[in-house]
Each structure stands twice: as structure tokens, then as C-alpha cells.
Image: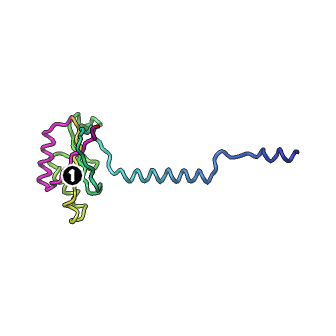
Amino acid sequence: MQNWKNTFKKKLSRFSKPSLRDIILVSLSLFLVIMLLRKETVEVNIILPEATEMEKLNKPSLINHIYIGKQKSFEWGNTTRIQINDAFITINNLQDAVLHLDKSRPDYLLPKVTTSLKIDKAAKMGIVNEVKHELRKANELRVNYAAQPRF
């Protein structure tokens, strides 16, 4: 009877080491995938306007994102700023910045590139019209306005 009681008194570890390694591996790979998907950080506050008629763009690799809104940090004041690829630009530099983005793509894909404007609801239309004018000068004629769905 003494042997019977000793068999149940074995200490069990709280975590099994092979499963702990699997959990760490899965969480690390998930973290890496998320970091690779997010290429740029948005440094402007954007509250998108609402829309009823929208369509989703098919290839995210063929989209140039331009963000227009007030800067999150108040280093430059409370003015409306333009951001492309983690960098703030001015209206005068917009054409050069867009042409620099196009140089990174092959020539046969350039007619399929869409420029997506993500504009804050409170942004003034004057700066939006200036951005559109500079995009026309840079021959970026496929322009999309980002919005959130209205239910």
C-alpha cells in the first residue's frame, strides 16, 4: 500500500518546456509579420470622412499614400502637414517626393499606380487643391480619396 501512495506524489511542472518554446516561436513570428506589414508610421491625426459608395483597391503594393492632417506632436505648431513615407514635406517638395516614389517601381507598373489621399475631416480644402495640382504636374492622374464606411 505504501508504493501506491508514492506514485501519485510526483511533482508536475507547471509548464511543459516544449510547448513553451512553441508559444515563444509563434509569438515571435507573429510580431515579425506585423512589423513587416506596417512600413510607415502615421505622424498626423486623421479622422476620415464617411462615404456610402466605396470600392477597395486591389493591390496595396501599387498605392502611394499621402496623409494630410494636423501633426500629432506639436513641434511645428498646430498647422496642417503633408506626410509621405514617414517624412513631412511641403507643397514645393511634393512633386519631387512623388517622382522619387515612382523611381522605385518598374516602368510597366507606373500606369497602374494609384495615389491615395488620406485627409483629415477638418483639413482645409485649399491645401487639398494644392496637393491635387502638384500631383497633376507630377503626372499622377489616378487619385483616390480614402474614407470610412457610413452605415
Residue at 12 percent across and 39 percent down: it is 126
Query: Residue furthest toward the right?
Result: 1
Query: What is the three-letter code of the residue carrying label 1?
Result: Thr
Q: Give the range drawn in magenta.
A: 122-150
Image quadrant in which the N terminus is located: top right
The residue under the point 27% across, 35% down is 74
In the image, what residue occupies the spot 25% across and 62% down? 105
Residue drawn at x 26%, y 52% as measured from the top left: 57
Q: Quick check: 34 left or right of 149?
A: right
Count the labels in the image. 1
Closer to us: 54 or 113? 54
Tell me the SS state at disc 1.
Answer: strand
Q: Residues within 10 Å of mark 1 (few under 14, many from 20)?
A: some
Q: Name the residue under label 1.
A: 115
Q: Where is residue 140 in the image (x, y as percent from the top left)?
A: 16, 55
Residue 89 on the magenta segment: no
Counting from the top left corner in percent of width and height, residue 54 is at: 24, 46
Q: Where is residue 143 in the image (x, y as percent from the top left)?
A: 18, 50
